[in-house]
């Protein structure tokens, strides 16, 4: 009961009493919801009785991506795009930016396609981010639903293609990434253990959710890679996200 009233209060605080209460009850009573949020140009879909509501809260109610950029990004990579809410926020803030979405889960990917269809210059990749080219399986290892699905390497029987950032940059014909958002549910450990030396110095800003609370040792390879790759950087926290800006690229 306390959580219910707390959530209603968050909606009202963010969107005002009438729109806030209206949005709250749309979430509560509809099965598959297409909603229109103030300040967002296109409506988008959320699935009831899934983790979509929690992702919505993280992005829109709690503002985990309300980050002040010191530059205008032109190339954004959304790794672990889920249903596309980060991409939607970025395209409304930076409509000219190219956004590349990477999402391994088939169900999430189908909603992602719908949610970003109204935006130009958004590329979708049904794949999982990894440190090498291999095959992966999507697993609900922690029984936490669509927002916490993990990928595990399975070279013989994996049904999802792994993609490295080097490969992504080649196929998308980009030589630099302005914003790299990473929310890949423990796979950040694999991503930063090896094969980052070529691409990491070409990234200007990283927004990453680290998952040591799910799997020990996720953050250590990340910070080791950052310290080896960046001579100078800034560090900040916004909600659940760690934000690293590569100051080596500021003068370029």
Image (cartoon, rainbow, N blue to C red):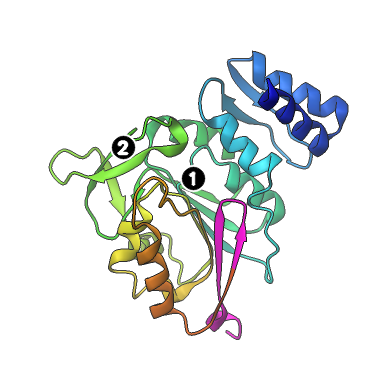
Q: Which residue is pictured at 47% across the width and 36% down the height?
A: 147
Residue highlighted by disc 2: 138
Percent of width and height locating residue 83: 52, 37
Residue 34 vs residue 124, the one in the foreground: 34
Q: Which residue is pictured at 62% across the width and 36% down the height?
A: 56
Q: Residue furthest front?
A: 2
**Compared with residue 20, is residue 38 higher up or lower down, i.e. above or below?**
below
Answer yes or no: is residue 164 visible.
no
Percent of width and height locating residue 23: 74, 25
Element at label 2: strand
Task: Classify mark 1: residues with Cα within 10 Å, few (<14), some (14-19) or many (20+).
Answer: many
Q: Tell me where residue 8 sits by quadrant.
A: top right
Percent of width and height locating residue 80: 45, 47
Alpha-carbon span between mark 2 and mark 1: 14 Å
Q: Which residue is pictured at 60% across the width and 86% down the height?
A: 251
Asked whether, in this view, residue 222 is left or right of residue 68, the answer is: left
Is 32 in the magenta? Answer: no
Boundaries of the magenta span: 236-252
Answer yes or no: is residue 194 visible.
yes
Residue 76 vs residue 228, the one in the foreground: 228
């Amino acid at each position: 009961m306390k959580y219910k009233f707390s959530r209603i209060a968050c909606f009202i605080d963010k969107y005002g009493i009438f729109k806030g209460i209206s949005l709250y009850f749309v979430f509560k009573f509809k099965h598959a919801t297409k909603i229109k949020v103030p300040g967002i140009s296109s409506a988008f879909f959320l699935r009831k009785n899934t983790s979509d509501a929690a992702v919505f809260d993280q992005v829109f109610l709690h503002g985990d991506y309300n980050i002040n950029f010191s530059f205008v990004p032109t190339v954004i990579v959304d790794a672990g795009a889920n249903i596309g809410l980060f991409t939607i926020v970025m395209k409304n803030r930076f409509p000219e930016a190219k956004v590349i979405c990477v999402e391994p889960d088939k169900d999430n990917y189908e909603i992602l396609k719908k949610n970003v269809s109204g935006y130009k210059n958004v590329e979708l990749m049904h794949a999982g981010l990894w440190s090498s080219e291999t095959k992966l399986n999507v697993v609900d290892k922690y029984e936490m639903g669509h927002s916490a699905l993990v990928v595990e390497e399975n070279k013989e029987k994996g049904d999802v293609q792994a993609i490295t950032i080097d490969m992504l940059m080649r196929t998308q014909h980009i030589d630099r990434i302005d914003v790299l958002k990473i929310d890949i549910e423990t796979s950040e450990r694999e991503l930063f253990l090896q094969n980052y030396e070529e691409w990491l110095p070409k990234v200007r800003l990283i927004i990453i959710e680290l998952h040591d609370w799910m799997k020990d040792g996720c953050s250590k390879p990340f910070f080791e890679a950052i310290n080896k790759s960046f001579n100078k950087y800034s560090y900040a926290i916004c909600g659940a996200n760690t934000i690293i800006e590569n100051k080596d690229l500021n003068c370029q």
